[in-house]
Amino acid sequence: IYDRARFVQHNLWVTRYDPRELYAAGDYMYQSADAQGLPEYVADDAPLTDTDVVLWYTVGAHHVVCPEDWPVMPCHYTGFKLKPVGFFDGNPALDVPPSPPAACHHH
């Protein structure tokens, strides 16, 4: 399967937006003769500046079984968070005028 699921080579991929590129493994992963999907999408090394991009990420979960999982396993969470760093030169909130104290009544 690895030959047909090359998207697992990296945790994160960024490609130019193309409405035909819908699946990380390509359109027909189990019926392909060679690698498709993300490696094929990035093969032309197209620049990403001034264009819409798609961020592809691979996440997996490993669950260690415990007695409490039987007969019904509780939730197992997994997730992804994208947080910009260095997006602004400084804190943009410092340029906002202070708001009037609405909760306090000064007599």
Image (cartoon, rainbow, N blue to C red):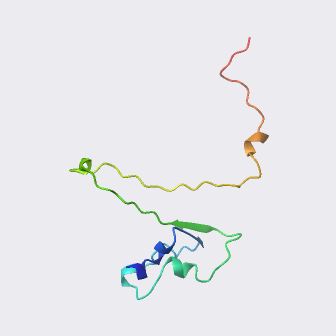
Above or below residue 19? Residue 67 is above
In this rendering, the count of numbered labels is 0
| Residue 32 visible, this orientation | yes
Query: Residue at left 47%, top 82%?
Result: 36
Q: Reply above or below: 95 against 34.
A: above
**Residue 40 placement (x, y as % from top left):** 53, 82
Q: Quadrant of the N terminus?
A: bottom left
Is 92 positioned to the left or the right of 30 in the image?
A: right
Instruction: Out of 23 and 56, give the one closest to the viewer.
Output: 56
Please identify the residue farthest to the top as the structure is shown.
107
**Residue occupying image coordinates x 52% and y 71%:** 10
Q: Is residue 23 visible?
A: no
Residue at 43% over, 55% down: 78
Residue drawn 67% across and 70% down?
51
The relative height of residue 41 versus residue 60 in the rendered view (above or below) is below
In the rendered image, residue 86, in percent from the top left (x then y), is placed at 71, 55
Residue 44 in the figure: left or right of residue 35? right
Which quarter of the figure has residue 96? Answer: top right
Q: Residue 43: x, y in percent?
A: 58, 83
Residue 97 image position (x, y, % from top left) = 78, 35
Looking at the figure, which quarter contains the C terminus? top right
In the image, is 57 to the left or to the right of 1?
A: right
Residue found at the very far left of the displayed protein? 71
